[in-house]
Image: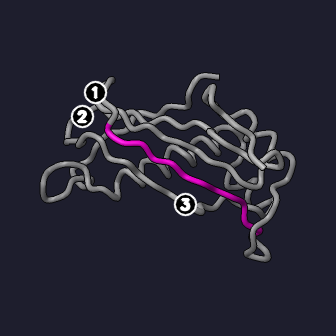
Amino acid sequence: MSKFIRQIEVRWADLDPNFHMLHSKYYDLGAYVRMCLFHEFGITANAIQELKVGPILLREECVFRKEINFGDKVIVDAELVKMKKDGSRWSIQHRIMKNDDKLSATISVDGAWMSLETRKLATPPQSFVDVLLKFPRPSEFIFCE
């Protein structure tokens, strides 16, 4: 499957005093696109509430390459790059591109699932694992132990 992509409009409120995008907004873009990915593939807020298990982040890292300015055309993608076979842990990578061809940042996240009842890490239901397996993946995708 091809990458999951969203075009983002840079708002005036996204800028810092240097008139480029504030560093925390990159993370916001990743979170937004990631949740769009989950939702579009079937892990919706309703499904999370019904099955009482939701995604959480264990690690989030952004490597900044090029500044993003007001008026830049910004595209953010999402790919599942690694996953345990039982779906209990997973890693997603986002590339933030500006003006069609300039890599501005890469966000890498490691995630897991949390029981909404016990507030502890949990193995997701098989229906969620099946959804994860449908996410766009790079050729370097790996199942991990």
Alpha-carbon distance for marks 1 and 3?
Answer: 28 Å
Residue 75 location, x and y as percent? 39, 33
Question: Looking at the picture, which amino acid does disc 3 mark?
Answer: Arg
Residue placed most toward the observer, 141 or 9? 141
Contact between labelled residues 1 and 2, with CB atoms less than 8 Å apart: yes
Mark 2 or mark 3, earlier in chain: 3
Mark 1 or mark 3, earlier in chain: 3
Residue 63 location, x and y as percent? 37, 48
Contact between labelled residues 3 and 2, with CB atoms less than 8 Å apart: no
Asked whether, in this view, residue 24 is left or right of residue 129, the answer is left
Q: Quadrant of the N terminus?
A: top right
Residue range of the region highlighted in magenta in the rendering: 104-115
**In the figure, residue 114 lies in which quadrant?**
bottom right
Kind of element beneath mark 2: loop
Q: Which residue is mark 1?
A: 99
Q: Which residue is mark 3?
A: 59
Who's the residue at 64% across and 38% down the image? Answer: 40
- Neighbor class of circle 2 (other Cα within 10 Å; few <14, some 14-19, many 20+) is some
**In the figure, residue 134 lies in which quadrant?**
top right
Q: Which residue is mark 2?
A: 72
Residue 105 location, x and y as percent? 36, 42
Who's the residue at 28% across and 43% down the image? Answer: 10
Question: Looking at the picture, which amino acid does disc 1 mark?
Answer: Asn
- Taking the view exactly as shown, the residue that stands out farthest to the front is 145
Residue placed most toward the observer, 51 or 58? 58
Alpha-carbon distance for marks 2 and 1?
Answer: 6 Å
- Neighbor class of circle 3 (other Cα within 10 Å; few <14, some 14-19, many 20+) is few
Who's the residue at 79% across and 64% down the image? Answer: 122
Residue placed most toward the observer, 66 or 47? 66
Residue 54 location, x and y as percent? 70, 60
Question: Looking at the picture, which amino acid does disc 2 mark?
Answer: Asp
